[in-house]
Image (cartoon, helix red, strand yellow):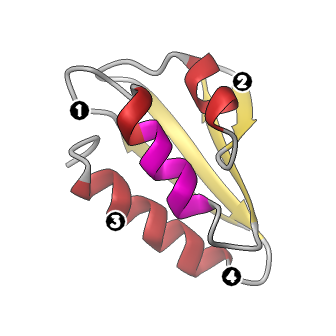
Amino acid sequence: MEKREFTITSETGIHARPATILVQAASKFSSDITLSYEGKSVNLKSIMGVMSLGVGQNAKVTISANGDDEKEALDTVAETMKKEGLTD
């Protein structure tokens, strides 16, 4: 299992558009990918799950991946978060 922590720097947090792009990026992989925030964990491949967390600016989140392509999955998700301006 691979795991990384991120601080959300975007003023709007993880709102609908970046959440959709993150879900699309995660869905390309066979690994189970989880987004954790304030003690709750959701499947990063579920837009409803991601939106239900209500992740705002300065939130600390953990993304973990477990499966055959876990490292590549986390690399891609981290890159997507950076590209979408969610994190530095």
**SS type, badge 4:** loop
Q: Is residue 41 visible?
A: yes
* Quarter assignment of residue 56: top left
| Image position of 64 (left or right of 67) | left
Q: Amino acid at mark 2?
A: Lys
Residue at 47%, 61% in the rendered image: 77
Q: Nearer the viewer, residue 79 or 61?
A: 79
Residue 1 is labelled as: none
Above or below residue 1? Residue 87 is above
Give the mark nearer the N terminus: 2 vs 3: 2
Question: Foreground mark, 2 or 4?
Answer: 4
Dominant secondary-structure state across the stretch colored magenta: helix
Which residue does the numbered mark 1 point to in the structure image?
A: 9
Q: Residue at x 59, y 60 (%)?
A: 26
For residue 79, which numbered disc appears in the image?
Answer: 3
As drawn, 60 above or below 69: above
Please give the range of residues in magenta.
Answer: 19-26
The picture places residue 70, in percent across and down from the top left corner, at 67, 74
For the residue marked with disc 3, what is the amino acid? Glu
Q: What residue would you read off at disc 4?
A: 69
Task: Please say whether residue 5 is visible from this viewpoint.
Answer: no
- Asked if the residues shown at circle 3 and circle 4 are in contact, with their CB atoms under 8 angstroms apart, the answer is no
- Rounded to the nearest angstrom, the CA distance separating label 3 from label 4 is 15 Å
What distance separates the C-alpha of mark 1 from that of mark 4?
Answer: 27 Å
Mark 1 vs 3: CB contact within 8 A: no
